[in-house]
Image (cartoon, rainbow, N blue to C red):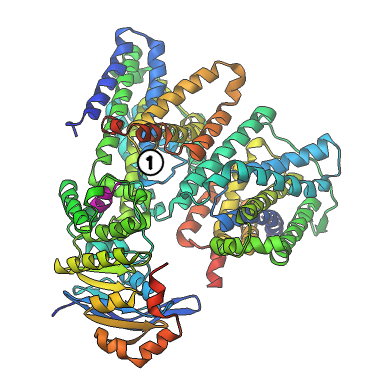
């Protein structure tokens, strides 16, 4: 994998993104980039489901929120350090996803997608009623939580670096999977599930595995993000709008490619930022996202990368 | 809680369930005819709700006059939606139709939110109810169930005794054969879609005669429609009506004992359970 | 001669229709067994039962000594039984090479990605797609897609290959080429169970033939025996002339 240029590009960009705001001590830039990194994480992991296996996961934000809750809870109540808490969050959520996936991924594409629509709402309601996690008010991190990391200022920077690292990991994992036997099986499932099964691809297992895999890094990112934010509560953790926007990002950039979702996330973030400055448009955020999604699905289903790779096939080797 | 109270709740649930069934019929019709899952279904239910509001509250027309208006305008809307968003994705992978209709839903709900915010709206419709012992069955609930039944009956007549209706069924069972026998399948598909949306709209109108609503209510009723569709079997309108009543029954059984916020969770759980155990619908089982 | 596949007393009902009734079938190692019968005789259903698309209502299916009755398709494929479908199902967005690699990766030999690619290349060459490895499967001609269907099934190096009307939709030249390919496959030691309507071809290629009618086995024997059997002729006369059905589909 390290013999091709792409992984090195990822590492280089990640280092750049991590270090530039740090060296210039530009907190505003950092905050903008944190959001962008979260988008890239959500989109590229979602791409494993949508772009590789062909299964739409409408409730993908559930992983992010649950990971956040597990991580923050471990830090706040059990005084775990950040990194183990985040990793525990990732492992816990992907384990639950595996179990749930083994059951629910027996369903074919459309039914599975429908099942994921309600899941966000259901989990949000459950968490709202779950007292150990603060119920409707959520969990609030006191400043002590940041002390082991050298105080709030340091902690925020550290959290930022970690999120950028998770972003790089997401892209590298996407790439590794795509070039692996597992990835080939997923792509076969995405093209024609019945044909894939006849060829020997163990479809129920692979689908459950990719569902679980797509849960891990967003969960870890959730833990770190909400630690950084200092508070987690149901509405912010299980933000359906963000779930939907992740889908738009994947489709915009080009589902099925590795760089597509990252590009889509970045573009969408820019678009959104530009639109939000105009007061009137902030109400129309989801309208525009919806219109964009519709146009993409109708006219450019391959997204940006699909278009680029068809137009300039030579670039395929560089842009995975 | 007394037995009569629970019984009354169940019966009330059955009445409301008939309207759920009507809504689900729209969804299952589109699904069965063109294998498209209309994720804008909820938005169209809300369309019907607001239709009632504007006709009855703003314009002061009698409430139930909104019913035929909903059907007609819903149909027109559906045909437009078909040409705008659905036509190009017929025959493409299911993923695409899910995303396309989902996108339409986003746009519609977004516009609705911008125009009317998320505040609740209520249309007060008064009808004399039927009293039985200590309990009164709300007039609007009874009327809604009756109208749902009537519309369902009209739908049956339409599908089985009119040219267009029969053409729709022909296209549903085998599009190529229908095409070969001279049926203009694309036109028929657009009309089937219009019909499905009309059913969604009119059931929204009926629901609005009974309960308050917001721009975001569509999601909850869409989920109910999905549960019902799965219960009754895809493309099976009769099953949808039965499934709706069954769901209403379940709601009537559980709502006396549980806070309202748990309803979506229970319905979601039911939905997933049904999908996994009865992939072809409970009522489809008995048909063999 | 060892028995590779045994179908024992298998039945399958769909709603009110008994598609396959009490069927016995045997494929020996190294042979080409032809499965013929008028339209609606249940031939494709038999294939679906064998490779696990749905389980039989009664009976057993034994492959290389192991019971595979009702096992899902991917498990059946793993045990060395591959299938080329009548209605081709190319993985359209993947290249020809990738299509075959899938077969090699997940079939009997469970190869690694690089080994699978080599096997895929070799098989693609065998069916004549060697020059089109980087073409997207969706862009192939009908004949090309048929060959890909075959190549993909073959990449798994199966013991038994189920061929479902691989000649449908092909012109004369393409049919001759396909016959050659089938011969080459058998030379590699792969046993074949094939459904075909082009009588001339199936009579030439098959070692033995089983005739199905209305879900039941009508008769079996060598091609010559079957061709002369009056019952077989009668069954087909109720349908169309078999030789006319093939060329222009």
At 82% across and 34% down in the image, what residue appears?
B58
x, y percentage for residue B285?
53, 69
At 28% across and 18% down in the image, what residue appears?
A148
Count how many numbered circles sit on residues in the image.
1
x, y percentage for residue C220?
28, 86
- Where on the picture, by quarter, is residue C211? bottom left
x, y percentage for residue C38?
41, 80
Q: Is A35 above or below relative to B85?
A: above
- Where on the picture, by quarter, is residue C197? bottom left
Write the start and end of the magenta stretch as one range: C95-102
Residue picked out by circle 1: A51
Quadrant of image for the N terminus of chain C: bottom left
At 31% across and 30% down in the image, what residue appears?
A86
Q: What type of secondary structure mainly makes up the magenta span?
A: helix
Q: Secondary structure at mark 1?
A: helix
Q: Is A269 above or below relative to B4?
A: above
Q: For the view shown, which residue lies furthest in the front direction? A: C173
Q: Which chain letter goes with mark 1?
A: A
Q: Nearer the viewer, residue C228 or B97?
A: C228
At 59% across and 21% down in the image, what residue appears?
A281
In the displayed structure image, the side of residue C123 where residue C36 appears, left or right: right
Q: Nearer the viewer, residue B281 or A298?
A: A298
In the displayed structure image, the side of residue C124 where residue B22 appears, left or right: right
Q: Answer whether residue A250 is magenta in the image.
A: no
x, y percentage for residue B31?
57, 55
In the displayed structure image, the side of residue B238 where residue A79 appears, left or right: left
């Amino acid at each position: 994998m390290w013999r091709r240029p792409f992984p090195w590009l990822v590492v280089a960009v990640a280092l750049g993104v991590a270090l530039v705001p740090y060296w210039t001590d530009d907190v505003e830039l950092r905050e903008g980039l944190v959001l962008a990194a979260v988008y890239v994480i959500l989109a590229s992991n979602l791409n494993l489901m949508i772009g590789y296996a062909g299964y739409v996961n409408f409730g993908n934000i559930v992983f992010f929120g649950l990971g956040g809750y597990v991580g923050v809870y471990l830090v706040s109540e059990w005084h775990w350090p950040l990194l183990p808490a985040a990793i525990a969050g990732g492992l816990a959520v992907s384990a639950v996803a595996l179990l749930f996936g083994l059951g629910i991924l027996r369903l074919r594409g459309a039914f599975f997608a429908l099942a994921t629509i309600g899941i966000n709402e259901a989990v949000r309601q459950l968490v709202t009623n779950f007292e150990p996690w603060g119920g409707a008010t959520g969990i609030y991190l006191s400043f002590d939580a940041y002390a082991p990391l050298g105080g709030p200022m340091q902690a925020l920077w550290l959290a930022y670096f970690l999120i950028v690292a998770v972003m790089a990991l997401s892209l590298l994992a996407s790439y590794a999977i795509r070039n692996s036997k597992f990835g080939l099986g997923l792509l076969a499932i995405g093209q024609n599930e019945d044909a894939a099964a006849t060829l020997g691809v163990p479809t129920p297992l692979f689908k459950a595995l990719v569902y679980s895999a797509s849960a891990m890094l967003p969960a870890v990112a959730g833990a770190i993000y909400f630690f950084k934010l200092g508070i987690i509560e149901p509405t912010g953790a299980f933000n359906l709008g963000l779930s939907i926007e992740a889908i738009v990002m994947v489709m915009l950039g080009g589902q099925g490619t590795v760089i597509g979702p990252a590009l889509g996330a970045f573009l969408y973030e820019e678009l959104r930022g530009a639109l939000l400055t105009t007061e009137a448009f902030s109400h129309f955020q989801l309208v525009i996202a919806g219109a964009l999604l519709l146009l993409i699905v109708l006219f450019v289903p391959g997204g940006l990368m699909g278009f680029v790779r068809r137009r300039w096939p030579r670039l395929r080797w560089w842009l995975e | 809680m007394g037995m009569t109270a629970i019984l009354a709740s169940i019966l009330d649930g059955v009445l409301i369930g008939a309207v759920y069934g009507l809504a689900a019929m729209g969804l299952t019709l589109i699904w069965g005819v063109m294998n498209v899952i209309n994720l804008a279904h909820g938005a169209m239910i809300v369309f019907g709700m607001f239709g009632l509001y504007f006709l009855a509250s703003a314009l002061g027309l009698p409430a139930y006059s909104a019913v035929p208006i909903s059907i007609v305008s819903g149909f027109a809307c559906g045909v437009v939606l078909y040409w705008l968003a659905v036509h190009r994705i017929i025959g493409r992978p299911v993923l695409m139709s899910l995303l396309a209709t989902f996108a339409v839903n986003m746009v519609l709900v977004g516009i609705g939110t911008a125009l009317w915010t998320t505040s609740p709206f209520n249309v007060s419709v008064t009808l004399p109810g039927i009293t039985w012992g200590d309990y009164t069955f709300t007039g609007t609930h009874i009327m809604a169930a009756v109208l749902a039944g009537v519309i369902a009956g009209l739908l049956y007549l339409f599908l089985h005794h009119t040219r267009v209706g029969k053409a729709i069924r022909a296209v549903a069972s085998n599009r190529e054969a229908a095409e070969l026998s001279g049926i203009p399948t694309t036109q028929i598909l657009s009309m089937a879609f219009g019909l499905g949306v009309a059913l969604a709209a009119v059931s929204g109108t009926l629901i609005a005669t009974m309960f308050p609503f917001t721009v975001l209510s569509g999601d909850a009723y869409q989920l109910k429609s999905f549960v019902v569709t799965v219960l009754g079997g895809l493309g099976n309108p009769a099953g949808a009506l039965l499934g709706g009543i069954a769901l209403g029954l379940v709601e009537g059984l559980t709502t006396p004992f549980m806070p309202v916020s748990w309803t979506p969770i229970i319905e979601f759980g039911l939905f997933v359970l049904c999908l996994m155990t009865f992939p072809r619908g409970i009522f489809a089982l008995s048909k063999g | 001669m060892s028995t590779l596949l045994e179908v024992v007393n298998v039945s399958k009902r769909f709603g009110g229709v008994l598609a396959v009734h009490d069927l016995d079938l045997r494929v020996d190692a190294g042979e080409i067994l032809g499965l013929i019968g008028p339209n609606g005789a249940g031939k494709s259903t038999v294939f679906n039962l064998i490779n696990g698309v749905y389980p039989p209502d009664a009976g057993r299916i034994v492959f290389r000594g192991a019971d595979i009755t009702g096992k899902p398709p991917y498990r059946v494929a793993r045990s060395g039984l591959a299938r080329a479908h009548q209605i081709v199902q190319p993985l359209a967005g993947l290249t020809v090479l990738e299509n075959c690699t899938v077969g090699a990766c997940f079939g009997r030999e469970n190869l690694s990605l690089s080994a699978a690619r080599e096997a895929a290349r070799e098989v693609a060459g065998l069916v004549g797609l060697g020059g089109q490895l980087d073409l997207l499967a969706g862009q192939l001609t009908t004949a090309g897609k048929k060959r890909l269907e075959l190549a993909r099934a073959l990449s798994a190096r199966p013991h038994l290959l189920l061929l479902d009307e691989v000649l449908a939709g092909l012109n004369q030249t393409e049919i001759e080429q396909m016959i050659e390919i089938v011969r080459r496959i058998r030379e590699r030691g792969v046993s074949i169970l094939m459904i075909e309507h082009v009588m001339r071809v199936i009579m030439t290629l098959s070692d033995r033939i089983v005739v199905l009618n209305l879900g039941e086995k009508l008769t079996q024997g060598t091609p010559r025996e079957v061709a002369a059997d009056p019952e077989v002729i009668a069954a087909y006369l109720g349908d169309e002339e078999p030789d006319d059905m093939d060329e222009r589909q």
